[in-house]
Image: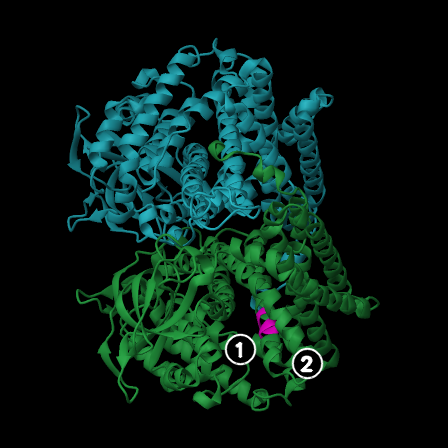
Chain colours: A cyan, B green
Amino acid sequence: MPTYQAPVRDMQFLFQDVLELEQFSNLEGFRDATPDVMNAILEEGAKLTQEVLFPLNQVGDQQGCNRRQDGGVETPDGFKDAYDTYCEGGWGGLTADPAYGGQGLPHVLGVAVSEMMSSSNMAFGMYPGLTRGAYAAISLHGTDTQKETYLPKLVSGQWTGTMNLTEPHCGTDLGMLRTKAVPQADGSYKITGTKIFISAGEHDLAENIIHLVLARIEGAPEGTKGISLFIVPKFILNEDGTPGERNGVMCGSLEEKMGIHGNSTCVMNYDDAVGYLIGAEHKGLRAMFTMMNEARLGVGIQGLAQSEIAYQNAAAYAKDRIQGRALTGAQNPDKPADPILVHPDVRRMLMNQRAFNEAARAMLFWTALFGDLSEKATDEKLREKGEDYMGLMTPVLKAYLTDMGFTHCVNAQQVYGGHGYIQEWGMEQYVRDSRIAMIYEGANGIQALDLVGRKLALNGGRAVTTFLAEINQYIDERRDDPEMGTFVEGLETAKSHLEEGTAWLMKNGLEDFNNAGAASTDYLYIFGLVGMAYMWARMAEAAQKKLNNGGASDPFYATKLKTGRYFIERMLPDTAAHLAKLKTGAEPLMAMTADEF
Amino acid sequence: MPTYQAPVRDMQFLFQDVLELEQFSNLEGFRDATPDVMNAILEEGAKLTQEVLFPLNQVGDQQGCNRRQDGGVETPDGFKDAYDTYCEGGWGGLTADPAYGGQGLPHVLGVAVSEMMSSSNMAFGMYPGLTRGAYAAISLHGTDTQKETYLPKLVSGQWTGTMNLTEPHCGTDLGMLRTKAVPQADGSYKITGTKIFISAGEHDLAENIIHLVLARIEGAPEGTKGISLFIVPKFILNEDGTPGERNGVMCGSLEEKMGIHGNSTCVMNYDDAVGYLIGAEHKGLRAMFTMMNEARLGVGIQGLAQSEIAYQNAAAYAKDRIQGRALTGAQNPDKPADPILVHPDVRRMLMNQRAFNEAARAMLFWTALFGDLSEKATDEKLREKGEDYMGLMTPVLKAYLTDMGFTHCVNAQQVYGGHGYIQEWGMEQYVRDSRIAMIYEGANGIQALDLVGRKLALNGGRAVTTFLAEINQYIDERRDDPEMGTFVEGLETAKSHLEEGTAWLMKNGLEDFNNAGAASTDYLYIFGLVGMAYMWARMAEAAQKKLNNGGASDPFYATKLKTGRYFIERMLPDTAAHLAKLKTGAEPLMAMTADEF
C-alpha cells in the first residue's frame, strides 16, 4: 500500500544550487562527477530503490529471516535476487577506490544513494551498509595483502562484511570484552567467544562473509588497551583466494526484534575460528572506530530515510483521505467531506516532517562533502576543516537525525489515525524499523557524550570555533538582505543559544564532569537545530536566487522557501528550552541516591 | 524478564495527603471509602495485577488472538482464567451503582485500579475497560428495562461490552457512517453494515457481548443528526434474560496490529442483526459521547500506566547493568564497571519518566475526584465545577498523557540500549502497546481541537477561568513561603504562558478558526504542563508538611521533593517554546497548497 519516490529533485538542488559541487571539479573523484553523471546515477538509484528494493520492504518485515537447523540463515523472499541486481549494477563500488574495482565517486553522492536504499528498504540496505564499514576498516588498517585479498570482493559485493563488537555483558564498555584470540604458529589466531546483535552476521546473499571481530589476545592488558581487531572469514580462503573450508564461526540464533526483520541480527559463536590480525596488536579499538564513524553517518542517514518515506506516504494519505470539514468551511463542497490536509494540525505534523527531512538531507550532504574534502582537497587548511567538521558533525547527525527521524515516523503514523496502527498500511513498520537507529552504533546518549566530552575539546575547540565563525560570517554578510530577514534572524538567535551553551559547558563542564553529562543531550539538540537553521538559510538563499533569476515558473523554489520559514518559526524556538534545561546543571539529575530510583 | 510493582504507596499519598479524600467522607460513595477500605482495595488490586495479569502480558503479546474458521475468537492462554479471577473478585463493580450489583465506590479509586490493570496488562485491561464504557452509556441513556436487563451482567463481568463507531471510510467524521437500521414491527431494528477497529469485538471470555452500535435509521437525516445508538447483543436474550439465539453479528477478521495483540481488534459484520434503540432516535452521537468521555479518561490512564511500568524496569536495569565508569571517577571500584545509573544522561531519561508519571497520576486522580464531585457533591457550585473540570481536563489528559506516556516508554527502552530492541526484555512491547493510546478514542489532534474549539468556549469560558483563578489563588497564598519558592515560581511562569496562550486564542482563534487549529496542540501541551506543575506544587507542599511534622525518617517525602524540583527545572521550560510556536498563527501551516505537499 505505501509508495516511495526517491527525492531526486531535492538532491539535485543540493548538489548544484546549495553545495555547488562544480566548484570542486578539479579534485579527484569530483572530476568524473559531472552534473550529467551525478544525475544519471541518481536516476538509476531511484529506479533500483523504487522498483527492486521497495517492493520487498513489507515482505521482509513480515517474513523476517529464518535460521535453519544447520545454522544457515535464509533472507526473505526476493532479497537474494535484489542483492544480485544491486551487485550487477556496481552499486557496491560507487565511492570505493578504483584500485579495488570502485568508481571513486564522491561520498556526498554515496550518501544520496544510501538515503534511497534506507528509505526503500532499511533492512536490506544494512547488508551492503555493513560491507562498506568493513571496506573502510580494511582499507585504512589492512596490509597490502589484506587489501588485495578482501577489498575487491567487498566492492563487487561477492562478499559482505560485519562488525563484531557487542557481547552479552558489554556493549558501550568494550573494555570488558572477553572474546579471546590465541596466536598460532603460522601467524594467524584462533578466536573464541560469543558476540551478540551482529547485523548481517549470517545470510544467503553472498558467497563469503568477512567478520571484523574485536578480541583480546591471550595475555593482553586489561581494558580497552588490550583489544585487537581480527578478520574472520566465514569460509577460510584457499591459496587462490577462493572460499574454502568452513571456519569455526556460526550463527547460534537470531534475535527476536522490534523491527528490521529483513536483516539477520545474529548471536555469533566463535569456536577456535581462524582469524587474522588487522592493524597493530592491542590497537583494535582505534581501527574499529574507523568503521564506526562510517557506520554512524550511515545510521544518521537511516533516520532521515525513514522519516522521508513516512512523510511521503502521510502527505499522500492526508490529500486522499476525506473526513470532516475545514474549520473555515467546506473546501470540497461537492464531496461528502474535505481531505484531512485542510486541518492545520494535520499540516503541523506534515510540515514538521518535511522541514526536518529537507534540512537533514542538506546537513548530511554538507557534512559528507567535508568528508570528501578531508581526503581530496588540495588546500591543507581545507582538508583539516573537512576532518574537523566530520568529527564534530558525526555524533550530531547520528543522534539528532535518528531521534527526530523516529519522532517524525511517529508523526506520519499519527496522520493515518487507526490505519497507522495496522500492518497493511506500512506506517507502523517505519516506526519499528527507525527505532533501532537511536540505539545501535552507540546509543544516542553516547553520541552526546562524544560531542561534549571529546569533539568539543579536540584541538582546543578548533572545530566548534570554526563552525561558529562560519555562521557568524554568514550572518554578517546577509544582515542587510531583506529577503533573508527571517532566516538570518532565526539563525542568529539559535546560534547565540549555541554560543551560550558552549560557553556554559566550557566553564561548568570542566569544573564537574557531571555537568557536561547532564547538558550533553540538550546541547546536541541545540547543535542539530542550529545546523538545520544554517542549512535552511543556505537553501532559502539558493531558492531565492533561482526565483530572482527567472525560476518563478517552477513551484519548487517557492515551496522551499515556505518550508524553510516554517522551520524557523515553528521548530527552531526549541533551542531556548534546551538551553534553559542545559543551564540547570547536574544537580537536579544527581540529587537522588540509587535507592531512590 | 520485566517486573511490575503496583505504586500503592504513591496512590495512598495522593488519596490521603494531597487530595485529602477524608474531607469528602460525608458524600455518597465516599462514606464507605474509609482509608482502611481504600488501602485494602489497593493492596488487593496490586495482588491481582502483579500476580495474575502481569504474568500474561508477554504471553498475550506473543500469542495474540486467534480467529477460528467459525468466526469465534480465542484469547491468549490464561486470559480466560484471569478474567474469571477478575470477575470473582468483583472488580467489575468497584465504582458501579449498588442498584445493579456494584460497590458504588468513588471513581478516583477506580482510576487507581485501572492504572494497575493497564500497567500490568494493557491488552487484557481493555476487555473490562470497554465494558465500563457500555455500562456508562446504558446507565445514562437506557430505559429502566434496558438497565435491569444489561447492567447487572456487565457489572458482574458475565457479559462484556464494545463500542462500534468506526467504519472503513469514516472514523473521526461519523456523519458519513453507513450502517443502517431498519425498524421492525416489534419495535426492534435490523442492523446491517461493517464496523472496523472494534476492540474486544469477539472473544471467549464472557458468555455474551453487548455491542453498542452507531447506525442510521432508514430515512434519517444526513450527517451526524441522523445517527442513532443501538444495543446489539451477540446472543439475543431469551425471555428470562439468558443468552439465546446467535445474533447476525460476526467477527469477519482480526486486524494485524503493531501492538495490544492480546486484545481482539475485530472487523465486525452486521447482517440483519437484531438491535434495540438506546436513547432517542437520531441522538446516538450524544449517547455515544458519554462512553467516549469515560473511555478517553481510560486512555489517558493507559498513557501513564505504560510509562509507569516502563520506568520501573528501566530504573531497575540502570541500577543493575554495569558498563563503563562514572564521569567523575569509578563509583564501584571493586567491580569491573559502574552501574549505568551513575551517568547524568541516563538519569535524565529516568527522571523525565518519573517526574511525568507522578504528576500524571496526580492529575488523573484530581480530575477523577472532580468527576465524583460532579455527581455526588451536595453543593451545586461544586457539582458544576466538577463537571467543568472533567470536560476541560478530559482532552488534556487523553492527549498529553498518551503522547508523553509513549515518549517515556521510548525513553525507558533507550536505557536498555540494544536489549531494549529485543523481545525478551519486554520494553519494546510497552512502546508498541502504548502507541495506540495516542490514536484511539479520538486521535490526539482531535483532543486538541476539542479543547480549543469546544471546552475553552463552553459557558463563556467558565471552566478555564475557574482553573486559572484557582491557580492564581494558590500562588498568592504561598508567595511568601520559602519552602515553596521553586514550585510557586515555576508554576507562575508556566501559568502566565497559559494565560497568554488563552488570550491569544480568544482574540485570534475567533478571527480565523485556522489559528485555533494551528495553535491547538501547543496549547494543549502548555495546559498539560501547567496542570502538572500545579500537581507538583501540591505534592511538594504535602511532602514538605510531612517532613516538617516528623516524617524525615521516611525517604518517600524527600524523594518526592527532588522529583518535583526536577520537573520544574528540567521539564517545565517547554511551555515557552510551545507559546512561541502557538503565536505564529496559522500562516506558516496554511501557506502551501495541497499540490506542494
Q: Nearer the viewer, residue B316 or B490?
A: B490
Q: Is residue B84 magenta?
A: no
Where residue A14 appears, as percent x and y from the top left, is 50, 22
Compared with residue A106, is residue B418 higher up or lower down, i.e. above or below?
below
Quarter of the image for residue B551 reads bottom right
Whether residue B553 appears in this view of the structure is no
- Which residue lies under the disc numbered 2? B380
Residue at point 32%, 22% (across, down): A44
> Which residues, given as a range, are shown in magenta?
B364-368
- Label 1 lies in what chain? B
Please report whichever mark, 2 or 1, sits nearer to the chain's N-terminal start: 1
Residue at point 21%, 66% (across, down): B71
Compared with residue B224, is residue A28 higher up or lower down, i.e. above or below?
above
Whether residue A117 appears in this view of the structure is yes
Compared with residue B397, is residue A79 higher up or lower down, i.e. above or below?
above
Amino acid carrying label 1: it is: Val
Looking at the image, the residue that sits furthest to the top is: A26
Single out the mark in the foreground, 2 or 1: 2
Q: Nearer the viewer, residue A114 or B516?
A: B516
The numbered mark at residue B8 is 1
Quarter of the image for residue B460 reads bottom right
Where residue A351 appears, as percent x and y from the top left, is 53, 39
SS at mark 1 in the image: helix
Compared with residue A312, is residue B139 higher up or lower down, i.e. above or below?
below
Where residue B193 appears, as percent x and y from the top left, is 30, 61
SS at mark 2 in the image: helix
Quadrant location of the C terminus of chain A? Answer: bottom right
Residue at point 67%, 71% (across, down): B539
Where residue B478 appears, as percent x and y from the top left, is 80, 69
Q: CA distance from mark 2 to mark 1?
A: 33 Å
Amino acid carrying label 2: it is: Glu
